[in-house]
Image (cartoon, rainbow, N blue to C red):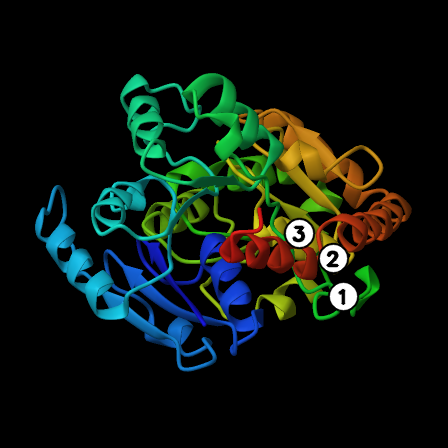
């Protein structure tokens, strides 16, 4: 039995967290025992989705630097005696120093994407932190080819330590069960954390611009934004300022994202930076064509046959794409069908979980 400690900033509804949830729930319970350590708490509702009696422990980190978490994490290592410590994203990377000091046999760090503090990955301080911390880690796992190249070429991580594992989903669960004609309105949908890095204000601005250019669009289209986060209030104010409260809805967070995809005609994203978002894979698997920014790993997934790409920040281009898809339902259907084919063929949950199993076994 191998014991794995997973370290995340917070366990709550999100793409990285769903990757973790799917992996630990799917791996054979007779071979792996998991424990999840968070820096800053967790959602009990989300944690309830964990199977196999997996324990979640918070280190109760204070805002800013809190050196107490290093002692607390060291104590958790001594109690659980893990064979592997797996940290996720920069906020938890420094705890690999504790794992190294405790002589944990296998130390793995995963990069799922960059945050608003450094969306382009150019900050020399954070590059240096990653390069130094990588020296205390056995394996670094980027989830996209974009992140792989950046870690190797720009950060300077030894390529021998890099293992590319792209995110994957359950394509049987996330399967098409809707039709564009099911909706009274033509629905542009978005699922994601409401944060500056996701730039949802651009979605609202572009949708408003499209309503000003076409009365038919204004009368027959809706925008649904699913998720919670620190930008909820300013986004609500922006919607109100455009007098779009009857056309644009902030749904809030939900654990049943499948039902949201079923109501969408087109999936839209406006991120400033990304890895390979789970919401993109899930919606495409449901046959919903994507319209996303040309950032991070998203161009690795989306091409002209299955969706639309536009430059980050280009509000008018997004408005134009929204208008063109609304007026061309045949194109929407064709793009959605191809989107489904791509996910089934290249982004299965089984392949992702098998890769992590090999990693934890020390076979890769």
Image check: 65 left or right of 259? left
Identify the residue at horizontal 32%, vertical 58% (top origin). Answer: 10
Badge 2 element: helix
Q: Nearer the viewer, residue 104 or 230?
A: 104
* Labelled disc at residue 175: 1
Q: CA distance from mark 1 to mark 3?
A: 11 Å
Identify the residue at horizontal 24%, vertical 61% (top origin). Answer: 77
Task: Report the residue marked by disc 3.
Answer: 281
Q: Nearer the viewer, residue 237 or 140?
A: 140
Q: Nearer the viewer, residue 258 or 348?
A: 348
Q: Are marks 1 and 2 in contact (CB under 8 Å)?
A: yes
Expressed as whole percent of the image width and height from the top left, the position of residue 214 reads 71, 38
Q: Earlier in the sequence, mark 1 or mark 2?
A: 1
Expressed as whole percent of the image width and height from the top left, the position of residue 229 reads 36, 53
Number of other residues with Cα within 10 Å of mark 1, as a class: few under 14, some 14 to 19, many 20 or more: many
Question: Which quadrant would the N terminus be assigned to in this image?
Answer: bottom left
Identify the residue at horizontal 74%, vertical 65% (top origin). Answer: 184
Badge 3 element: helix
Question: Dividing the picture into quarters, in which one does residue 212 lie?
Answer: top right
Number of other residues with Cα within 10 Å of mark 3, as a class: few under 14, some 14 to 19, many 20 or more: many
Task: Report the residue marked by disc 2.
Answer: 285
* Labelled disc at residue 26: none
Q: Is residue 82 visible?
A: yes
Q: CA distance from mark 3 to mark 2?
A: 6 Å
């Amino acid at each position: 039995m191998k014991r794995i400690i997973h370290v995340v900033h917070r366990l709550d509804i999100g793409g990285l967290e769903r990757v973790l949830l799917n992996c630990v729930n799917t791996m054979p319970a007779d071979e792996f025992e998991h424990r999840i350590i968070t820096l800053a708490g967790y959602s009990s509702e989300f944690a309830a989705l964990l199977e196999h009696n997996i324990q979640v422990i918070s280190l109760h980190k204070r805002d800013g630097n809190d050196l107490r978490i290093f002692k607390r994490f060291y104590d958790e290592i001594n109690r659980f005696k893990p064979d592997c410590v797996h940290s996720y994203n920069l906020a938890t990377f420094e705890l690999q120093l504790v794992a190294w000091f405790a002589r944990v046999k296998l130390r793995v760090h995963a990069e799922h994407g960059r945050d608003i503090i450094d969306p382009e990955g150019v900050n020399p301080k954070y590059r240096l932190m990653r390069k130094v911390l990588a020296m205390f880690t056995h394996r670094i796992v980027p989830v996209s080819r974009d992140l792989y190249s950046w870690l190797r070429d720009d950060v300077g991580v030894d390529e021998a330590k890099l293992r590319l594992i792209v995110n994957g989903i359950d394509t049987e669960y996330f399967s098409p069960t809707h039709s564009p004609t099911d909706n009274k309105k033509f629905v542009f949908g978005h699922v994601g954390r409401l944060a500056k890095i996701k730039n949802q204000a651009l979605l609202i601005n572009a949708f408003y611009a499209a309503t000003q250019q076409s009365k038919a669009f204004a009368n027959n289209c809706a925008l649904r934004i699913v998720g919670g986060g620190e930008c909820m209030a300013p986004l609500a104010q922006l919607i109100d300022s455009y007098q779009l409260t009857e056309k644009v809805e902030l749904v809030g967070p939900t654990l049943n994202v499948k039902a949201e995809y079923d109501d969408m005609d087109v999936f839209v994203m406006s991120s400033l930076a990304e890895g390979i978002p789970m919401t993109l894979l899930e919606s495409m698997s449901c046959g919903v064509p994507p319209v996303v920014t040309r950032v991070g790993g998203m161009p690795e997934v989306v091409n002209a046959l299955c969706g639309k790409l536009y430059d980050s920040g280009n509000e008018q281009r997004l408005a134009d794409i929204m208008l063109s898809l609304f007026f061309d339902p045949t194109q929407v259907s064709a793009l959605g069908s191809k989107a489904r084919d791509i996910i089934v063929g290249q982004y299965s949950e089984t392949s992702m979980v098998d890769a992590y199993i090999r990693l934890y076994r020390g076979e890769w």
